[in-house]
Image: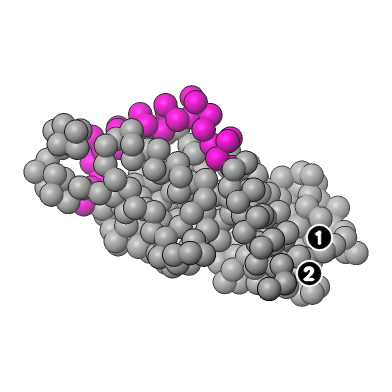
Amino acid sequence: MLLGMLAGLSPLAHAACARLVTSGNPEYPPFLWQDPKNDSRLIGANAELMQLVAREIGIPIEVRYAGPWGRVQESARNGRIDLIAGAFLTQPRLTYLRYLQPPIRDTQTLIWTRQQHPLQYQRWEDLQGQEGITVVNNSFGQAFDQFAAANLKLQQVGSVKNALQMLGLGRADYLIYEDAPGLAYAASLNIKGLRASTVPVSREKLYLTVALASACNNEQLAERLSRAMKKLSDERVMDALVEKYLRIWQAQNSSEQRPG
């Protein structure tokens, strides 16, 4: 079956693309996080989605831990991985990533604050003059990224865990992060007294992307991946996967916090 699926590819692709290696942001529950039973792989809604895509295209997909999010992007830029399972669309990333339609999922980014230091957020300008924090190499959409670079005081830290802990300790006025991952991490860290804005900073689409430097990057593979994504999108599989992996994440972290 694999040979049949690869019939339209070049001889180079036959040799190089017997499997695809993908990675993504490893601090992104319920979409992706490092497997506690095997730290060389990622699990989550996007990881299971990749297995469904693999079944559709007839090519195995390995969902590998490739380091922090910044290193994952560098690995895609250098062709060390073939796919990123979840990236926002930004102009700089178009230089090294091919974005596939349809997107994996729509997401929204919120402003997180401490309840004792509420920030009445309604628009981007409300953040000016405040001390913000975000995670290094994260994007929240091209338009907001440009506004933030020109107008906001934002400290970048290495992980969302550090960012949430710093916010909880009052070392920043606000944190910019997405809704589902932010809720998941705040619960797992048992950080109390945080609140999220009801008005999102941005609404962005999360995409499956192909590394332009990958030996597997070609039109035929991109078309196959897009057809698979269209089928799975029509079946609304991500809704069920996100709910499933929110439960798994919560159960995993509850067991870790339980006295031994």
**Residue 43 magenta:** no
Residue at horizontal 48 percent and vertical 37 percent from the top: 103
Q: Which residue is mark 1?
A: 194
Task: Look at the image and tell me in which quarter the N terminus lies.
Answer: top left
Q: Which residue is mark 2?
A: 168
What is the residue that sits farthest to the left in this orientation?
Answer: 11
**Residue 227 magenta:** yes
Magenta span covers which residues? 215-242
User: Which dot marks residue 99?
Assistant: none
From this viewpoint, is residue 162 visible? yes
Q: Position of residue 203 (x, y in %)?
A: 63, 41
From this viewpoint, is residue 155 visible? no
> Is 147 on the left-hand or right-hand side of 97?
right
Tell me which numbered mark, 1 or 2, is placed earlier along the sequence: 2
Query: Where 229 sits versus 33, above or below?
Result: above
Where disc 1 sits, the SS reads: strand
User: What's the coloring here?
Assistant: one colour
Residue at horizontal 62 percent and vertical 41 percent from the top: 243
Q: Position of residue 47 (x, y in %)?
A: 45, 48
Q: Position of residue 155 (x, y in %)?
A: 65, 71
What is the residue that sits farthest to the right in this orientation?
Answer: 116
Residues at discs 1 and 2 in contact (Cβ within 8 Å) = yes
Say which amino acid is labelled 1.
Answer: Leu
What is the residue that sits farthest to the front in this orientation?
Answer: 260
Q: Is the residue marked by circle 2 packed among few (<14), some (14-19), or many (20+) residues within 10 Å?
A: many
Q: Main secondary structure of the magenta part?
A: helix
| Spatial separation of the CA atoms under disc 1 and disc 2 | 7 Å
Residue at horizontal 66 percent and vertical 63 percent from the top: 255
Residue at horizontal 41 percent and vertical 33 percent from the top: 229
Say which amino acid is labelled 2.
Answer: Gly
